[in-house]
Image (tube, rainbow, N blue to C red):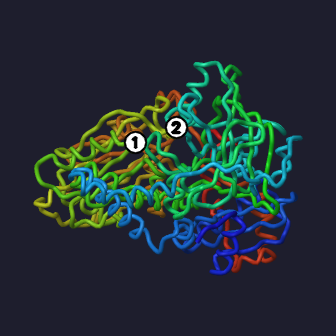
Amino acid sequence: MTYNSIGDFIVALEKDGELIRINEQINPELEITEIAERVMKSKDGGKALLFENTGTEYPVLINMMGNETRMLKVLRANNYKEITNEIEDLSNLFLNEIKSGFFKKMKLLPNLIKMASYLPVKTSKKAPCQQRIIKDVNLNTLPILKTWPHDGGRFITLPIVISQHPDTGIRNAGMYRMQVLDEESTGMHWHMHKGGAAHFDLYKSRKEKMPIAVVLGGDPVYTYCATAPLPEGIDEFLMAGYLRKKRVKMVKCITQNIHVPADADIVLEGYINPEEDFVCEGPFGDHTGFYSLADYYPKFHVTCITHRNNAVYPATVVGVPPMEDAEIAKATERIFLYPLKMMQPEIIDMHIPELGVAHNLVLIKIKNSFPGHGMKVLHSLLGSGQMMFSKVLIALPENVDIFNMKQVANHVLMSVNISDNISFSVGPADVLDHASNKFALSGKVLIDATDTKAKSISRTKLVFKKDLDFVENIKISDNTGWIFVNKANYKFDNKIIDVIADNLDKENLPILINIIDSVFNIDDYNFLIWLVLSNIDPKKDVLVIENSIFVDACVKNRKQDGFERDWPNIVVMDKNTIEKIDQIWLNLGIGDFIKSPSLERLKMQSGDGAVFK
């Protein structure tokens, strides 16, 4: 099915019972976030929410891709396997035919013609996205969200930012958050590794203004494709055409020489002047679950707003997982598995758990054929596009379920000689990785756990032989060897490790000890896994001693740890907003009361701000 607007998608969601309309007036500042997070963390990702009374003329749609059912509707598929099989068949056909003779190559023509039919095409006809043209720009007329209390302002969270190469005209569509600075301008938070930033550098070298168009809405597959890690030079709207089996019609903007999907809901036209000083943008409660701190980025000037009649404003909220972006990441994991397998045929499957927030943990199942095979695969993955940001990578054999975290942990700790199969390195880090001591540069830890001949060990109960004065709480998993330790105000160093090791009766079996601060709850394994992965730079925070792993997942600071950067707070809603939504919950029509996920996190913040103090 083709959705010509978010409105069409809303009709389809409502028909399938996947949408809840909320008529109560809800403030886009904080209140939508508080409602949305409760729903996103409910069973199966909850429903999509349409806020119809936002104090503006535009309703807000949120959580539109928050579960597998809705994500597959966006992708026009019955299941993810259907998409991966189609990509695999198409890739194999092209590879096999290209290697053949002339007459066999002629068989490619129907497939080339089919692919050509998905290429975006320009149209000069009047476009729905330009039914209303507003040159007297005022961004305050849009229901732009402030998502968390210590955000630097209101942020556009689902923008499809379109730019083009100044020489070749090759287009890039990326998703970069945009903080509203005033009625006519925003920040443009693109990271140094992204396509938009590369285009910006070219315009800067030419001292030319950079035309930009920001698309909101339209066919929801556009939004997904803007998040997809496509190779450089591959048009995101070609991928959109391929997924929806219909080419995307593009129309020229009113005030900028750049084209946008004709069926978009809202378009912000404008430019960036590369010779203008960068603006301070942030903090922002990010998909990592922490605030990404303020930094300097280009300033986007809006010259015109166009939109269709009855336009809907799309938004999302990110924070401590799971949130809506978890399902988007799952779709990417499934769709882009086969391209990895093409480069490395020994790969069987891949899992990037939502608790690793995209880059912190990568699990790869491979067919192991020789010593060091797993390590070879892991090192090569660090050279594969955005996989370069990965922080903890584990190669696993065919008999391990990589989607079962406890089974993975059991295998690594009970069947692998850690000291012989672990490697550390340093490489590019996600700009949002707060645990790296140097901006955008972090340690990596690679574990080759593919030795299927390793003998599984049995484990008895782990116990501490005596109380440790610097330990406030200990959680020991009897079967896996996971240990979580709440520590008091002591520096993590070899002395603490020695004391723990000397006082732990582990029968010389491997263990994984994670040391965290006393403010964090150690009763929720999922939360602990997320916290540990987020708070470590493996090169300096992971130590291997006598086949056991010691992990410092504590908050770092300048005085005690020599950490040179600010350490961010976990994102948490403020008490007043929580109480307000508690009071009106039964009026929202969402169903049974859902308590705020922030209640468990309130005690984990330190100080009144985005920075942990």
Q: Which residue is mark 2?
A: 194
- Picture disc at residue 251: none
Q: In which image quadrant can residue 403 be found? A: bottom left
Q: In the rendered image, which residue does mark 1 sit on?
A: 385
Give amino acid for label 2. Lys
Most foreground residue, 319 or 602? 319
Q: Amino acid at mark 1?
A: Gly
Q: How many marks?
A: 2
Rendered residue at 58%/60% (across/down): 221
Residue 501 vertical position relative to residue 211 in the rendered view, above or below: below
Q: Is residue 586 visible?
A: yes
**Residue 390 at what x, y percent from top left?**
39, 44
Residue at (18%, 66%) from the top-left corner? Answer: 458
- Judge by depth and name the residue closer to the eye, 101 or 527: 101
Distance between mark 1 and mark 2 Cα atoms: 11 Å
Q: Residues within 10 Å of mark 2 (few under 14, many from 20)?
A: some
Quadrant of image for the N terminus: bottom right
